[in-house]
Image (cartoon, rainbow, N blue to C red):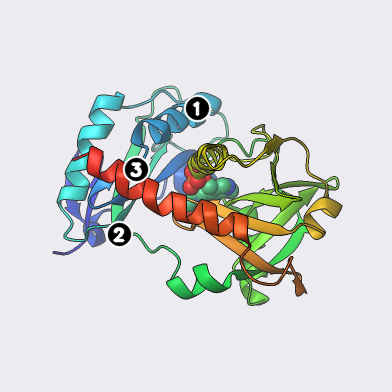
Amino acid sequence: MSETAYLNGEFLPLDKAQVSVLDRGFIFGDGVYEVIPAYSRRPFRLPEHLARLQHSLDAIRLSNPMTDAEWTRLIHDLIARHAIEDQSVYLQVTRGVARRDHAFPKDSKPTVFMMSGPLVTPSKELVENGVPCITASDFRWLKCDVKSISLLGNCLLRQAAADAGAVEVVLFRDGRLTEASASNVFIIRDGRLLAPPKDHLILPGITYDVVLELAAACGIPIELRAVTEQEVRSADEIWVTSSTKEVLAVTTLDGKTVGSGRPGEVFKAVHQEYQQYKRKVMRHAA
Ligand code: PDD
């Protein structure tokens, strides 16, 4: 089965899906997106992803082109058109096609695009050994809670990580931890889980919420507060989380060993809970 896309009301082969060069997504990066993992062909935390999509659309003053029921039906339909069990569904909504002018067009129709591909989660080796990360100053804009398709800052930062042979780049703004280029960041100090609270400086990760729920269920004390760069650099454990990375331990930061240099005990407990939770949720979704 070849990859199928959805574009403005129709399903078609991905390589046949085309938009105008005047689309504001192409010209200005004027749009928002979501990445939704599907396990055993069932979308994970779909209502939460759709709520975040609504938040992003509201933030850029674009009305939602579909109801949650319509999104849900289309996403299930797209998944059903692919043979793979575990998929990563990508959707984006842009402000549509209009003559180039920074101000919003009066009557453009949003462009709605979706595709789905294999969900590539970290290998057993990465989970068991952890990953290297670097750090950088967070120079992105001040609306990082919006899942904007304008990802140039994130791409530049991630490329710096790739150039250094690292998996992610942990970001600091004014001496405080924000997140990473495409993940949220947690640290463990003295058995406590610390993370920055959800505000305009980080994306409100769906996995962030799952990890907090699972950590609480494991009885791990949680502190959501500003986390200093010094606290990160001397943490016992550092984790990155996202829909595709799930939860992954960082074992070196800027070439320096984190904690014991191996994924920590708290990470192992929460990672195991995550795997169990996924399987449980998927069984109930049947
Ligand atoms: N990125 N922070 C940023 C900047 C992100 O881009 C992402 C996800 C996250 C984690 O969010 P979630 O847990 O909802 O996936 C945090 C997606 C996966 C991407 O752009 O591919």
Q: Position of residue 79 (x, y in %)?
A: 21, 49
Cα–Cα span, label 3 and label 2: 15 Å
Figure check: 267 above or below 200:
below
> Would you say residue 90 is visible in this rendering?
no
- Residue 95 image point, x, y percent: 43, 34
Mark 3, secondary structure of its residue = loop
Name the residue at 43% across, 71% down: 123
For disc 3, the marked residue is 44
Which of labels 3 and 2 is toward the front?
Answer: 3
Label 1 environment density (alpha carbons within 10 Å; few <14, some 14–19, many ≥20): some
Which residue is rendered at x = 50% and y = 27% of the image? 55
**Residue assigned mark 2:** 117
**CB-based contact (under 8 Å), mark 3 and mark 2:** no
Q: Amino acid at mark 3?
A: Phe
The residue at which mark 1 appears reads as: 55
- Pick whichever of labels 1 and 2 is earlier in the sequence: 1
Question: Relative to residue 146, is residue 270 depicted above or below?
Answer: below
Instruction: Residue 115 in the image: state x and y as whole percent.
Output: 29, 52
Type of amino acid at the residue the image marks with label 1: His
Mark 3 lies within 8 Å of ligand 1 (Cβ measured): no
Looking at the image, is 163 positioned above or below residue 147? below
